[in-house]
Image (cartoon, grey):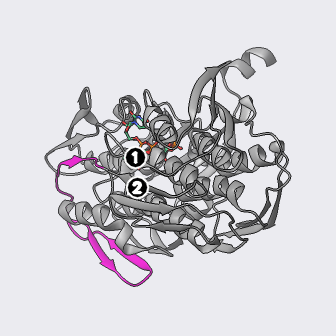
């Protein structure tokens, strides 16, 4: 099993290039099913979630080719059966986007219950509510969601709460439905806007993405286009926090600073300098780090996907910080790992109380999910001594070449192969 070994305590310096956004790209790749001609996606991150999405499309009969490492050609006309293979779907939450895109094209979808990081229960009742409003019915067959409709007809969809996934799926199902769909209480994340821009460039009629009311007038045909994915707001935020945690001086390039506003604001509160330019942010530290409080919220609030990384930074700050994350049930599992490194954090349900300890000490730790893994990397970079991180396949779900990018900033991080306990038992 591969691990990261980090010799910490070195400030990061230099410039890092941010890749395309995972949470946008997984939706854009699924959206190619709705396109009536071949299309090309640029600035797609080289991460395992994308490799899995490509495999799902290929297994269903699509032609998917890498034109270069971040540019992918899709021709989905060869898909005949609207059915996602079980083994691929169950490892990835984004597989639920195939429900909406297959339903939108074939009026039928068969998609095993989605998997992904274990952040607690991740129900899809609002996704199904949206499909139902457009005329579909659903049932569970052999552990899979089976959704069908004789025809899809535009309607009003009101979400009970803000949900990114269900907003994406409602757009997918409505884009070729008959007439007008109005989504109310829609999510406003940059990846929703990116999806709407991609579909509109193909000829869709989607207005209001980025606000909480999205209006979609169904169209019959979507033409082939070449489209570039937006930069990854969470990858950028992760490097911003890594620069701060190591008391470094880093330019984070190829970003949309507006997408980073909630992260920038909190970093400034902690005492970190952040200077914005057109397509980059410069982050450096020249004083002490101070406590702050965070509550995760849908966009434009502070993103749940940045909570573990930021909480790690707060362990290095002076004073007591309170972090509340109630988007998911289980996003504090990394805390037990940070405690191995000397952090003083207590968790009560969805609230963590972080007592700043000034510095962390290297230790063997485990990535318990994607962003928890990123938090372990940040902790390892800031800590004195050696940190060994296990289960790095989680990190590779969402970070393109994180070890290479960090080495470019002067970090001492190596990918090493070490047999795990089972392998050691077998060999000896
Ligand atoms: C609002 C929010 O921060 N969404 C995040 C969420 O999106 P993701 O699309 O995974 O989750 P949603 O935005 O849909 O979920 C928001 C909340 O609603 C609940 N829910 C959702 C759908 C549903 O049908 N029923 C239901 O109860 C979820 O359990 C969660 O508590 O995780 C992604 C990956 O970490 C992030 O990129 C998104 O920014
Ligand atoms: C948990 C994440 O992704 P997913 O919803 O794909 O599991 C994430 O991006 O932080």
Instruction: Give the percent coordinates (x, y) of residue 40.
Output: 73, 69
Q: Report the quarter where the C terminus lies.
A: top right
In the displayed structure image, the side of residue 203 where residue 293 appears, left or right: left
In the displayed structure image, the side of residue 122 where residue 111 appears, left or right: right
Tell whether circle 1 marks a residue whose Cβ is less than 8 angstroms from ligand 1.
Answer: no
Tell whether circle 2 marks a residue whose Cβ is less than 8 angstroms from ligand 1.
Answer: no
Instruction: Tell which circle, 2 or 1, labels the residue nearer the N-terminal end.
Output: 1
Of residue 224 and residue 4, the one placed in the foreground of this image is 224
Indicate the secondary structure of the residue bearing disc 1: strand
Instruction: Give the percent coordinates (x, y) of residue 219.
Output: 61, 64
- Residue that badge 1 annotates: 157
Indicate the secondary structure of the residue bearing disc 2: strand
List the single residue furthest toward the left.
319
Q: CA distance from mark 2 to mark 1?
A: 6 Å
Seen at 80% across and 39% down, the residue is 81
Identify the magenta region.
271-297
Seen at 44% across and 57% down, the residue is 234
Instruction: Give the percent coordinates (x, y) of residue 126.
Output: 43, 37
Q: Quadrant of residue 308?
A: top left
* Label annotation for residue 307: none
Q: Is residue 108 visible?
A: yes
- Residue that badge 2 annotates: 182
Seen at 30% across and 45% down, the residue is 311
Q: Quadrant of residue 129?
A: top left
Of residue 141 and residue 263, the one placed in the foreground of this image is 141
Q: Is residue 379 above or below residue 117?
A: below
Seen at 32% across and 58% down, the residue is 212
Instruction: Give the percent coordinates (x, y) of residue 257.
Output: 38, 74
**Could you tell me if the residues under marks 2 and 1 are in contact, i.e. CB atoms within 8 Å?**
yes
Q: Is residue 7 magenta?
A: no
Q: Is residue 409 visible?
A: no
């Amino acid at each position: 099993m591969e691990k990261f070994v980090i010799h910490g305590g070195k400030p990061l310096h230099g410039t890092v290039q941010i890749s395309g956004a995972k949470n946008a790209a997984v939706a854009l790749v699924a959206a190619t099913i709705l396109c009536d001609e071949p299309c090309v996606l640029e600035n797609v991150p080289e991460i395992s979630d994308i490799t899995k999405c490509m495999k799902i499309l290929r297994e269903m009969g699509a032609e998917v080719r890498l034109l270069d490492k971040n540019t992918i050609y899709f021709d989905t006309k060869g898909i005949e059966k609207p059915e996602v293979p079980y083994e691929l779907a169950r490892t990835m939450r984004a597989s639920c986007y195939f429900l909406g895109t297959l339903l939108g094209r074939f009026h039928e979808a068969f998609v095993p219950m989605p998997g992904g990081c274990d952040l607690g229960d991740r129900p899809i009742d609002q996704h199904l509510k949206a499909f139902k409003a457009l005329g579909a019915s659903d049932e569970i067959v052999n552990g899979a969601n089976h959704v069908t409709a004789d025809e899809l007809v535009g309607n009003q969809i009101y979400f009970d709460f803000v949900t990114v996934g269900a907003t994406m799926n409602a757009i997918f199902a409505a884009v070729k439905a008959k007439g007008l769909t109005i989504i109310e209480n829609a999510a406003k994340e940059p990846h929703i806007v990116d999806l709407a821009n991609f579909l509109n460039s193909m000829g869709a009629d989607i207005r209001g993405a980025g606000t909480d009311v999205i209006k979609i007038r169904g169209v019959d045909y979507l033409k082939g286009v070449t489209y570039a994915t937006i930069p990854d707001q969470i990858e950028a935020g992760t490097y911003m926090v890594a620069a701060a945690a190591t008391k470094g001086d880093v330019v984070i390039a190829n970003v949309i600073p507006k997408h980073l506003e909630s992260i920038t604001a909190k970093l400034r509160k902690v005492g970190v300098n952040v200077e914005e330019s057109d397509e980059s942010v410069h982050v450096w530290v020249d004083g002490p780090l101070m406590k702050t409080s965070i509550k995760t919220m849908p966009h434009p609030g502070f993103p749940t996907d940045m909570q573990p990384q930021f909480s790690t930074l707060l362990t290095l700050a002076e004073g007591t910080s309170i972090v509340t994350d109630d988007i998911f049930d289980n996003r504090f599992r990394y805390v037990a790992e940070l405690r191995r490194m000397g952090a003083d954090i207590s968790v009560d349900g969805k609230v963590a109380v972080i007592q700043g300890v000034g510095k962390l000490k290297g230790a063997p730790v485990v990535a318990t999910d994607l962003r928890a893994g990123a938090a372990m990397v940040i902790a390892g970079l800031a800590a004195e001594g050696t940190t060994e991180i296990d289960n790095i396949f989680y990190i590779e779900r969402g970070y393109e070449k994180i070890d290479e990018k960090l080495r470019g900033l002067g970090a001492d991080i190596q990918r090493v192969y070490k047999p795990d306990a089972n392998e050691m038992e077998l060999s000896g």
